[in-house]
Amino acid sequence: MRPPKRRISTTSGLTFGSDDKGKEELAKGVAALANHRGGVLVIGMAEAKGVPSRVFDVDLDDYHLRRIRQVIANNTAPPVPYEPIRAPDPDDATHGILLLAVPRSPQAPHAVTATPTKDSKDVLRYPGVREARPNGSRKRWWQPAIELATPRQRLVMSD
């Protein structure tokens, strides 16, 4: 049985957290999952046209897991909760695939606070991260009232 396609997201060769683009992509990925239905982010698998094509091993040591945790905590607001799951290579236990299990968050919506590396539509960001553009950008800016509201009020406000 295959899981629903929208609930699985794979990396395409990015080393998350190693540069600004990696930090932003990781933050966008986990925030999107937490704001929607939750799901699993797969780190260590390349894809071609949306289909997983090959495995490339990533470091599974504690240093890299702490680095990923730091990137997520520093680039999402409120920080997105997740659970890292290691899937080590049978030949080398220090490398393998890393799964980030992200539940649907009761604290949603989560904004991305990472510095944008390119213009991307439909990303919830704080106003100070990027100046609003007069050309009708579709970005929705974080509303301070949402942060102070209860989870039920947030759902009503986000519609």
Image: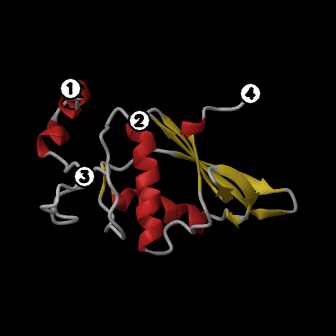
Q: Which residue is mark 3?
A: 139
Mark 4, residue position: 1
Q: Does residue 114 sit above or below 123 in this rendering?
A: below
Q: CA distance from mark 4 to mark 1?
A: 35 Å
Upstream in sequence: badge 4 or badge 1: 4
Of callouts 4 and 2, which one flags the residue occurring earlier in the amino acid sequence? 4
For mark 3, give the secondary structure.
loop
3D distance between C-alphas at marks 3 and 4: 36 Å
Picture coordinates of residue 80 (x, y %)?
A: 40, 47
Q: Secondary structure at mark 2?
A: loop
Sequence-first disc among 2 and 3: 2
Circle 2 sits on which residue?
Answer: 36
Residue found 19% across the figure and 42% down from its top = 147
Q: Amino acid at mark 4?
A: Met
Q: Nearer the viewer, residue 64 or 22?
A: 22
Q: Quadrant of the N terminus?
A: top right
Counting residues from the N terminus, which is met first, the one under dot 1 or under dot 2? Answer: 2
Q: Is residue 121 above or below residue 71?
A: above
Q: Which residue is mark 1?
A: 156
Q: Give yes or no for contact between labels 3 and 4 (Cβ–Cβ under 8 Å).
A: no
On the image, the x and y values in percent for residue 20 come to 41, 73
Q: Is residue 4 left or right of residue 139?
A: right
How far apart are the two marked residues, 1 and 2, measured between alpha carbons? 15 Å
Q: Secondary structure at mark 1?
A: helix
**CB-based contact (under 8 Å), mark 2 and mark 3:** no
Q: CA distance from mark 1 to mark 3?
A: 19 Å
Are the residues flagged by discs 4 and 2 in contact, CB closer than 8 Å?
no
